[in-house]
Amino acid sequence: MSTGTLLAIIIPIVVVLALIALGASVLTRRRRLRQRFGPEYERTVEQAESRRAGERRLREREKRHDALDIKPLPAATRDRYAREWSSVQEEFVDRPEDAVHDADRLVTSLMHERGYPTEGFEQQAADLSVEHGRTLDHYRAAHEIETLTTRSKATTEQLRGAMVHYRELFDELLSDGGRARHAPS
């Protein structure tokens, strides 16, 4: 066989193999993002102009998150937060709207203590989505109801639901399932 014939066979094979490798890489990255972000993956991709743009946003969130100094809480601090949560739950009986506001403040305080920035709800949600994507829907739902309380438009059942939603994120942030990481020193 001549060199030209060999090149005519080898070059297409190399191109096909390169395309297969590229496709596998894209699928692996996509699968990793889906696993890490859970339901937040679909939400972000749906809101973006394209899947690629949504995935880029998720990778940017990862980079921002990796630069944060997210830390586990000492046992005494966890106990203090658990006591504060119990007080907020007890408050719900007599003052449900106040309890929901206090639950929001307590979750925000816990986020801050763990090392998350707390400069606004959307940024909080984006930062939390990297490690807490599976409970982020709870936070969004609770926040939406908490917003209704500022206009006294939330029903008692909605307020109860907000407390349940806040509790999901609160518990995860409090224990963090041992997933806390320190930023490089």
Image (tube, rainbow, N blue to C red):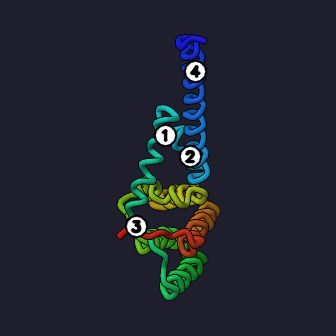
What is the x, y in percent for residue 52? 49, 35
Q: Residue at x 39, y 68 (%)?
A: 69
| Dot 1 or dot 4, earlier in sequence | 4
What is the x, y in percent for residue 176? 56, 71
**Amino acid type indicated by mark 4:** Ile
Q: Residue tagged by mark 3? A: 183
For the residues carrying marks 3 and 1, which lies nearer the camera in this image?
Answer: 3
Q: Residue tagged by mark 2? A: 41
Q: Residue 120: which numbered mark, if any?
A: none
- At mark 2, the secondary structure is helix
**Amino acid type indicated by mark 2:** Tyr
- At mark 4, the secondary structure is helix
Q: Are marks 3 and 2 in contact (CB under 8 Å)?
A: no
Q: Nearer the viewer, residue 48 or 61?
A: 61
| Dot 1 or dot 2, earlier in sequence | 2
How far apart in space, not on screen, are marks 4 and 3 (Cα)? 46 Å
Q: Is residue 11 something that shows in the picture? A: yes
Q: Residue at x 53, y 55 (%)?
A: 140
Residue density around tag 3, few if under 14, some if 14–19, many if 20 or more, within 10 Å = few
Q: Residue tagged by mark 1? A: 54
Q: Is residue 28 left or right of residue 68?
A: right
Q: Are marks 1 and 2 in contact (CB under 8 Å)?
A: yes
Which of the 4 image quadrants contains residue 158? bottom right
For the residues carrying marks 3 and 2, which lies nearer the camera in this image?
Answer: 3
Residue density around tag 2, few if under 14, some if 14–19, many if 20 or more, within 10 Å = many
Q: Is residue 76 above or below residue 112?
A: below
**Amino acid type indicated by mark 1:** Gly
**Amino acid type indicated by mark 3:** Ala
How far apart in space, not on screen, are marks 3 and 1 (Cα)? 25 Å
